[in-house]
Image (cartoon, rainbow, N blue to C red):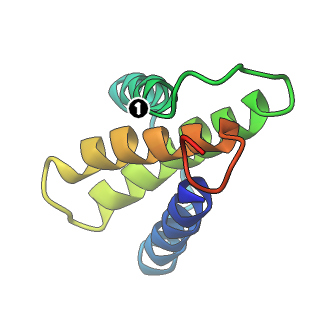
Amino acid sequence: MFALAALLAQIAVILVNRSKNRTGSRPESCTLHTVLCLLGITAGWLAIGRPEITWADAPLVLISGLLITVEAAHATVRLGAPRWADKAVCVLCGAAAATWMSSGWIPGT
């Protein structure tokens, strides 16, 4: 699944950031990242054929596509990536998280 690969990559970025930047403060709230993640989830949902959204899938999509993705985008900024990289992380990983709603391993199957 695309969602699992994206989730593992996000966790790796977050762990690298936390090991390099040992700060005790919480990351600031970023509305732009949240909106881009939601747009990515919507785009992914449309791309895989608009499957029915169930209560079993929705929390997994929101946790991996929104909460973890926003923190991964913040970690991307802190690690010194280009200015556009955090926005790309939000949209692409949000879209990948939508594949949790797909019934098969590959969207559209």
Q: Within the image, what quadrant is residue 98 found in?
A: top right
Task: Pick the residue in front: 58 or 11.
Answer: 58
In the displayed structure, would residue 18 be above or below residue 44?
below
Q: Amino acid at mark 1?
A: Gly
Residue at 54% x, 45% y: name it. Answer: 107
Q: Secondary structure at mark 1?
A: helix
Q: Is residue 52 left or right of residue 23?
A: right
Q: Residue 90 placed where, x, y %?
A: 38, 41
In the displayed structure, would residue 28 be above or below residue 76?
above
Task: Pick the residue in front: 71 or 43.
Answer: 43
Residue at 60% x, 45% y: name it. Answer: 109
Q: Residue 40 placed where, x, y %?
A: 40, 32
Identify residue for label 1.
40
Q: Within the image, what quadrant is residue 77 found in?
A: bottom left
Q: Residue 69 placed where, x, y %?
A: 50, 46
Q: Is residue 63 left or right of residue 79?
A: right
Q: Residue 7 placed where, x, y %?
A: 58, 59
Badge 1 density bin: few <14, some 14–19, many ≥20, Cα 10 Å: many
Q: Is residue 32 left or right of residue 72?
A: left
In the displayed structure, would residue 23 be above or below residue 93?
below
